[in-house]
Amino acid sequence: KNEVEQSPQNLTAQEGEFITINCSYSVGISALHWLQQHPGGGIVSLFMLSSGKKKHGRLIATINIQEKHSSLHITASHPRDSAVYICAVQTSGSRLTFGEGTQLTVNP
Amino acid sequence: DVKVTQSSRYLVKRTGEKVFLECVQDMDHENMFWYRQDPGLGLRLIYFSYDVKMKEKGDIPEGYSVSREKKERFSLILESASTNQTSMYLCASLDRGLGNYGYTFGSGTRLTVV
């Protein structure tokens, strides 16, 4: 079993839909990161969370430390949101352990 | 904005060649990382560095070495490239000041070893 599990692996949505991507982890963490990777490879850091909830534009990230679970929500999804979304947990020091990613496709 | 710059987007090298992948960051971050990304395996840590001339092995260091002579530059070296090192390589640096984001990634280098 991976230390970081994401679901779903693939997600297809229509433009405007509300999207949720889930991340569960099995280890103690100091922080959890949500990352976005577009085709071509570059990775952008969306959020770093250690508790509660953060919002940036149409993106919302939440974390429940007791349940070892985090969710990334996208409101009013748009085709430009199509990307791979990666959950990563920060464990000892500054090292990250990554989930395998969720491929999101938003159709117009 | 913090920038992490990787010197090449695409590289093709021959088996047995010594390969240098360069990464430069412009925000005085102490921590820098090299990852490789492969389908079905996700991102895996090769090496990281928490200060000049300091380095630590990650999860898959075999066949790689690193160099950090200056704070802004972290180089990944493939001593003798092999076809199983064909991969996407990503460099990252960490803001210990921990704004909203923490990590900044480079655009990646897609290396093909033939």
Image: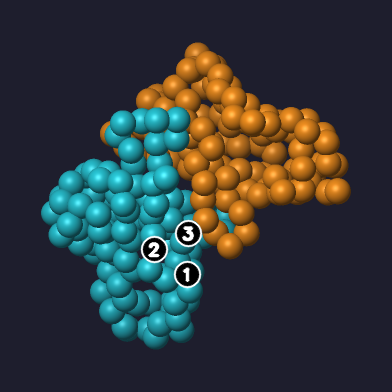
Chain colours: A orange, B cyan
Residue B71 position within the rendered picture, expressed as x and y whole percent measured from the top left? 20, 52
**On the image, numbered disc 3 is attached to which residue?**
B107
Q: Find numbered disc 2 in the image and state the secondary structure of the residue it sits on.
A: strand
Identify residue for label 2.
B6
| Residue found at x 25% / y 54% | B72
The quarter of the image holding the N terminus of chain B is top left
Query: Can you see residue A4?
Result: no
The subunit carrying tag 2 is B
Q: What is the quadrant of residue B90 in the picture?
A: bottom left
x then y, percent, for residue A15 = 83, 41
Residue type, mark 1 in image: Arg
In the rendered image, which residue does mark 1 sit on? B9
Q: Around disc 1, counting alpha carbons within 10 Å, would you say few (fewer than 14), some (14 to 19), or many (20 or more)?
A: some
Q: Contact (CB < 8 A) between labels 1 and 2?
A: yes
Left or right: A25 with respect to B46? right
> Which of marks 3 and 1 precedes in the sequence?
1
Which picture quadrant has residue A87?
Answer: top right
Q: How many numbered dots are placed on residues in this image? A: 3
- For the point 85% across and 42% down, the residue is A14
Which of the two labelled residues, at mark 2 and mark 3, occupies the earlier sequence position?
A: 2
In this view, which residue lies farthest toward the front? B1
Whole-number angstrom distance, CA of label 2 to CA of label 3: 7 Å
- Along the line of sight, which residue is nearer the eye, B94 or A58? A58
Mark 1 vs mark 2: tell me if same chain.
yes
Labels 1 and 3 touching (C-beta < 8 A): yes
| Mark 1 residue element | loop
| Separation of marks 1 and 2 at Cα, in angstroms | 7 Å
